[in-house]
Image: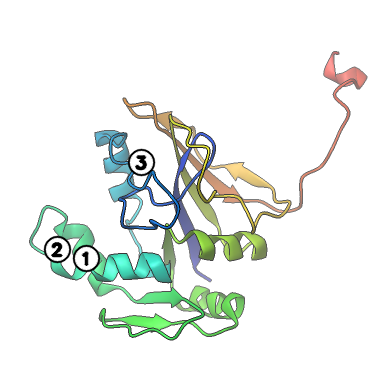
Amino acid sequence: MGLIHIEMFATLDLVGQAPGGPEEDPEGFPFGGWQAPLIDEVEGAQIDASYEGTDALLLGRRTYDIFAGYWPYQEGSQNSEIATLFNRVPKYVASRSRLDLKWAGSTQLGSDLPGAVREIRDRHEHIKVVGSLDLVQTLLREKLFDRLDLWVHPITLGVGKKIFEGGTVPTNLTLLEPPFAGPKGSVFLRYGLAEGTPGTGDMSAPDRGL
């Protein structure tokens, strides 16, 4: 069974909407492209490294449309390595609307999204989810992920779609490696899905020393 890796970019108030540019999700959101002034060489290198071994992409419709309009034309550019990877691997698209998928290697998933994702897991080793906030809500709700890479950036927006929103359910995660920060203050956190659900306790219990 393969692994599903989610990569998300968030503000301190955990807004994840349209980090890459104003055109990503412009409806009622005035901060499209908020990540651009904050990205640095450390974050860029880690993002590139995180695609190592990827053999499939799992995307929501909006992210797919943005990628399909860009990556097929980037081979030979400074982004050639990522472009070659994205153009080569299968792309699976979650959407309720019927799509015209012109990007080679693209497949639209059926109405049973959790079932389709489980089938993809059996078919591939390293499935990468990028952006796709609505899709991520389903993956979080169904606990259909193995690793969550979260970049937290040193700004707050107060508006916008959040990473942990409609799909959030009680879930345990484990930190897979020590966090680190880039020179512009963005912090990288890598979590893995853990068994069980969050427990509770009493902070005034004698063994707490309070």
Q: Which residue is mark 3?
A: 34
Residue type indicated by callout 2: Gln
Indicate the secondary structure of the residue bearing disc 3.
loop
Whether 155 is drawn above or below 20: the answer is above
- Residue 202 is left or right of residue 46, and the answer is right
Q: Where is residue 79, by image quadrant? A: bottom left
Q: Residues within 10 Å of mark 3 (few under 14, many from 20)?
A: many
The answer to whether the residues at label 2 and label 1 have Cβ atoms under 8 Å apart is yes
The quarter in which the C terminus is drawn is: top right
The answer to whether the residues at label 1 and label 3 have Cβ atoms under 8 Å apart is no
Residue at the location (35% across, 63% down)?
A: 54
Q: Which is more N-terminal, label 3 or label 1?
A: 3
Residue at the location (33% across, 56% down)?
A: 51
- Residue 166 is left or right of residue 3, and the answer is right
Residue type indicated by callout 3: Trp
- Using the rendered image of the protein, determine whether residue 139 is visible from the camera's viewpoint: yes
Q: Which residue is mark 1?
A: 71
The answer to whether the residues at label 3 and label 2 have Cβ atoms under 8 Å apart is no
Residue 72, position as x, y percentages in the image: 19, 70
